[in-house]
Image: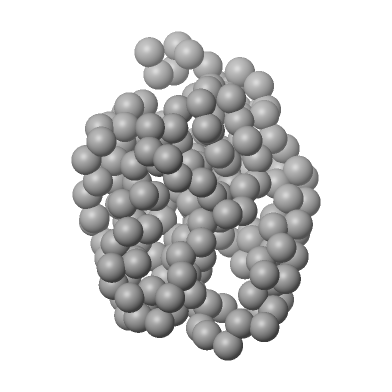
Amino acid sequence: MNPNIKKVLISEEEIVKRCRELAKDIDRDYANNPRKVLFVALLKGSVPFLSELIKRVEMDVEIDFMDVSSYDGTESIGDIKINKDLNTSVKGVDIILVEDIVDTGRTLSTVKKMLQNKGANSVKIVTLLDKPSRRIIDIKADYIGFEVENEFVVGFGLDFNQKYRNLPYVGVLKEECYK
């Protein structure tokens, strides 16, 4: 275990198991869907989750990426900046928006509205983690890996100043590392 981790919150095994379950739910919900399904991952944090999830999804899907930012260190700054937009049109497409964590809800709310405005047929959200205690914007994920308390979590894509993304588990960062 990384020495800066206070405790492991969710093990790699638990993440893999939950990704299998989420993939089954998604496959079931889109089983008779005649439209293209596009997984849109929000960079960078959702990449490990996307990778683990889509290899378990059985239906044909496409993937694309957006890079949006709303954080400065440990705090959400409330202003959403689009650093990289999609490479493909979403008009008439069913989108599954992939996120590492739903925290305040600002980012996902903005991105979801943007995709709807671009003509997406539907936009559903799948997230590895949900932290409802920090929610400012009323938005709910359609598929949730794990609900977590208000602790500073890192690993499996989640970072602090671009560090810890590569941990194969989700852990709680020691306070002295970010205070």
Q: Residue at x 34, y 42 (%)?
A: 106
* The quarter of the displayed image where residue 142 is located: bottom right
- Residue 171 in the image: state x and y as whole percent: 61, 29
On-image quarter of the C terminus: top left
Q: Which residue is drawn at 32% across and 59% down?
A: 113
- Residue 102 in the image: state x and y as whole percent: 48, 41
* The quarter of the displayed image where residue 14 is located: top right
Position of 63 with respect to 80 (left or right) is right
Q: How is the image coloured?
A: one colour
Q: Which residue is drawn at 61% across and 82% down?
A: 33
Nearest the camera: 162 or 93?
Answer: 93
Q: Residue at x 44, y 32 (%)?
A: 135
- Residue 78 in the image: state x and y as whole percent: 25, 36
Nearest the camera: 49 or 34?
Answer: 34
- Residue 81 in the image: state x and y as whole percent: 22, 49
Number of numbered labels in the structure image:
0
In this view, 172 is above or below 44: above
On-image quarter of the N terminus: top right
| Residue 156 appears in the rendering | yes
* The quarter of the displayed image where residue 24 is located: bottom right
In this view, 64 is above or below 110: below
Position of 90 with respect to 26 (left or right) is left
| Residue 48 appears in the rendering | no
Q: Which residue in the rendered view is the most extreme toward the front?
A: 138
